[in-house]
Image: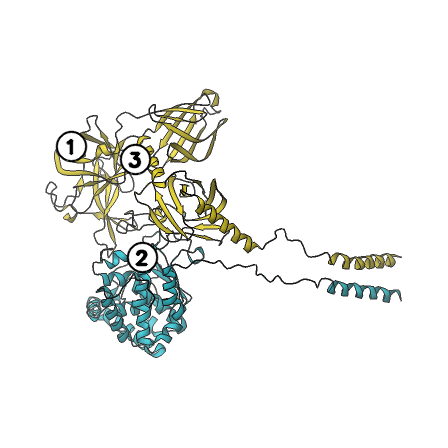
Chain colours: A yellow, B cyan
Amino acid sequence: MKNNTLYRILVAVCLMLPLVSCVREEKDIFDKSASERMNEWLVSTQNVLTSAANGWVMHYYPEGNQIYGGYIYTLVFTEDGEVTVRSELFDDPYTSLYKMDNDDGPVLSFDTNNYAFHYFATPSGGASMPNQYGESGRYQAYKGDFEFMVVKAEADEVILRGKRTSNLIHMYPLDEDPATYMSKVIALEDILLVTSFEGTIGGDEATLFLNPGNRQATITLTGEKYLDDEGESPSETVAFLYTESGIRFYKPVEIGPYTLEILEFEPTEKKLISSEADLVGSLPEGWHFYNDFVGNYTLTYNDGDATMTGIEIVADVKNKSYKIKGMNPLFDVVATYDQGMGQIEVQAQYVAEPDVTENTYRVMMAAWDSDKGYVNYTTGGLYGMLNEEGNTITWSNNKKFSGYVVDGFLLYYFTTTGTRVGSTSDPWIWSGRESLASGKNQLWGWTTFTRN
Amino acid sequence: MRKYIILFILAVSASLLASSCRTETLNPESIIKAEVKQKNDFDKWLDANYLNPYNISVKYRYEMDESDYSYYTIPADMECSIIMAHLIKYLCIDTYDEVAGIEFTREYFPKMFFYLGEWEYKNNGTYILGTAEGGKKIYLTGVNYIKDVLNGNYQGYTVPAEGINHFYVKTIHHEFTHILNQLKEYPADFKQITASDYVQDSWNEYSGNLPLGFISSYARANDREDFAEMMSLYVTHDQTWWDEQLATAGKTGAGFITSKLDIVRSYMNNSFGIDIDELRSTVLRRQEELINGEVDLTSLDII
């Protein structure tokens, strides 16, 4: 009996097998092959890119955590594979090639070098091995992408995802000529100099601080009702970029009950506004424009006992850095502009490599506490405040070499791996400067730069 | 009996199974579609000068599949790529054609070049000039500096020929030597000459390579690099330069270097029928012609 049942089941199953096996092959979900659909998608994406009459504005963010902030590019794509790029960092447009590819999914790749586009992706070597932008010390560049997955491609918006960073990069069609648009962005950057804002978001008290150097914005709801158990106010820091009319965050920022993404700048009242935000900006005391520092000076050092004439602060990268010429015939000293504070700063830095072919030693200008006799070659330096008349820069410790009071700089030899070899007693480094005794490698007690 | 019936049913079912789905036909269209890319004038020039005669592909456009994601680098500039392609053709490919015959070049010269705009920098301050893979492909980095190098305006190399050799051409001879070594092994004696002084990856921390019998600091990495450095530095420099190196090396160092050179010379002669002195004079002659402006490095006319 048991056997019978078993047989019946077996027979039944066998009879059913031919039935199921002949259900026709699985229906394709798509009517075309994966490769055909990919090609169609690439072609349609390219059509979208090339059909914008004035091209596109791209909101570009290098580095996976957007630590350098965002920058505006404009791009005009042609059907035969060329792209013309403008960047807010360079005056001229540059043309190169692009391709639509499918190595990892649909990809837009900027696959020949474009001076404007590849800036954040261009690495550099040591101090003697600068890249085409004259930058050094960045073997991983700014970790910028030049290959992107295409996430969305429609006439009103293209969304890309950086292949290395996974950053979302948005593009919008331009309704004016790229050069005109870019000049508006640059003009906005020139007037949006305020970095500290106070006001309201949705009627609640709030502050906004912009760090123009790395383009990070910190938004805080300061109202008492938002204080948490530890007495902290809710605060968010996010990368931003300058648009033609204000600033835009990398992504919508949620703070308290509010969401902020785009703030428009209102120059007469120095306000950043949106439908909910109304924030009024002010400049810190003693704030000066970038260009205010440029000029010829006399350095007073040794705590006022010695002077060095013929010092010149020369503009370099606008709103970012200067070169100080005349301190030594062999190298320039790099100074930075702190846009938030509107002041100048000189930090410990590499200044020269005496023998580029051997590449063994480097000369470092180290921060120097002449009282304690300690140096620091990675951090520390002097902060320069320009007076109201704009004719004297007064130097003081920038407090970044903690525990020490930096009052000048000392030249040291270091190996390429950063080991200190010894002081540059060899006077070559200061040769040509009569104001310093032969063999002297230090310049301590900086007090002022007085304009000639 | 019942058993047989069941077996019979089973057999029928099984055959049904086998036959029931034979209606499928192959879709005449391949699911893999090759992309159709328009060729520009440079692509056509490359076809005429690299692909058709030598089956060499020059990839001057960035491709993720070819690149090494452990480095940050950028694509090559188009204009610089054009100069580079002319330069390599004239200084390397045509040189081997002349010295060893076109069949040699066709058979052994690497089949693929991949250009990159910048050097591949490592975090220890060194950088990669070029690499060869599997005897087939050569990565060429720093292509965007070719114009500066030709103008004698890069990294202290004021003599263009020295710059070209240091940054590019020596690299190609160096990598090509690796490729030849992969095809035919060189005698093990080579390794024994200075066996105890190879230092692997820390080569860049040492100086004073010549007295120890190494033609360059990189030659200290290992015997394969040593061999490739010997070959590539020899064929790209004249005798005066070589004698200077030997003089600096001193008696012992010079002795080692000369012993190594003897092995390189006989290896190239026995394995490939190439006289390295003839190769050197051809390289140097062509180099001079190029530096003197006798070679058009930008024309995309197809002759």
Q: Position of residue A153 (x, y in %)?
A: 49, 44
Q: Residues within 10 Å of mark 3 (few under 14, many from 20)?
A: some
Three-letter amino acid code at the position of disc 2: Cys
Task: Name the image quarter holding the N terminus of chain B.
Answer: bottom right
Q: CA distance from mark 2 to mark 3?
A: 43 Å
Three-letter amino acid code at the position of disc 1: Arg
Residues indicated by labels 2 and 1 sit on the same polypeptide chain: no
Residues indicated by labels 3 and 1 sit on the same polypeptide chain: yes
Task: Judge by depth and name the residue closer to the eye, A108 or A392.
Answer: A108
Q: Secondary structure at mark 3?
A: loop
Q: Looking at the image, which residue is at 33% across and 52% down?
A: B124
Q: Position of residue A289 (x, y in %)?
A: 26, 31
Q: Residue B80 — which label?
A: 2
Task: Name the image quarter holding the C terminus of chain B.
Answer: bottom left
Three-letter amino acid code at the position of disc 3: Lys
Q: CA distance from mark 3 to mark 1?
A: 27 Å
Q: Which residue is mark 3?
A: A400
Tell whether A50 sits left or right of A324: right
